[in-house]
Image: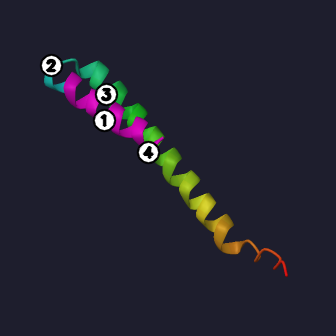
């Protein structure tokens, strides 16, 4: 997912370079949404890992 953020960020930069401002804003918005989604999923996964109980020990 982080790869998609980088892809849309680069597409936004290229579109801005060529003067397609509406397209650049769209790509930047998509990149921002994907970035926040990635960050939230990372935080939730980290908290689930930290608060999960230790797995039972097999002897």
Asked if disc 4 and disc 2 are in contact, CB closer than 8 Å, the reply is: no
Residue 6 part of the magenta-drawn span: yes
Residue drawn where x is 62% and y is 59% of the image: 45
The disc, 3 or 2, on the residue closer to the chain's N-terminal end is 2
The disc, 3 or 4, on the residue closer to the chain's N-terminal end is 3
The nearer-to-camera label among 3 and 1 is 1
The nearer-to-camera label among 3 and 2 is 2
Q: Position of residue 33 (x, y in %)?
A: 46, 39
What label does residue 35 carry, if any?
A: 4
The part of the image, by quadrant, that contains residue 42 is bottom right
Query: How would you rate the neighbour count of disc 4 (Cα within 10 Å): few for under 14, some for 14-19, many for 20 or more?
Result: some
Q: Position of residue 44 (x, y in %)?
A: 62, 59
Q: Position of residue 19 (x, y in %)?
A: 16, 19
Compared with 38, 42 (above or below) is below
Q: In the rendered structure, which segment of residues is drawn in magenta?
A: 1-15
Separation (CA) of disc 3 from disc 2? 13 Å
Residue drawn where x is 76% and y is 77% of the image: 54
Compared with 8, 58 (above or below) is below
Asked if disc 1 and disc 4 are in contact, CB closer than 8 Å, the reply is: no
| Left/right of residue 16 with respect to residue 2 in the rendered view | left
Name the foreground residue: 30 vs 45. 45
Separation (CA) of disc 3 from disc 1? 10 Å
Separation (CA) of disc 1 from disc 2? 14 Å
Badge 1 marks a residue whose secondary structure is: helix
Badge 3 marks a residue whose secondary structure is: helix
Residue 11 part of the magenta-drawn span: yes
Tag 3 residue: 25
């Amino acid at each position: 997912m982080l790869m998609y953020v980088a892809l849309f960020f680069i597409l936004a930069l290229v579109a801005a370079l060529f003067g397609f401002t509406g397209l650049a804003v769209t790509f930047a918005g998509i990149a921002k949404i994907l970035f926040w989604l990635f960050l939230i999923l990372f935080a939730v996964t980290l908290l689930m890992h930290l608060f999960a109980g230790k797995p039972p020990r097999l002897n």
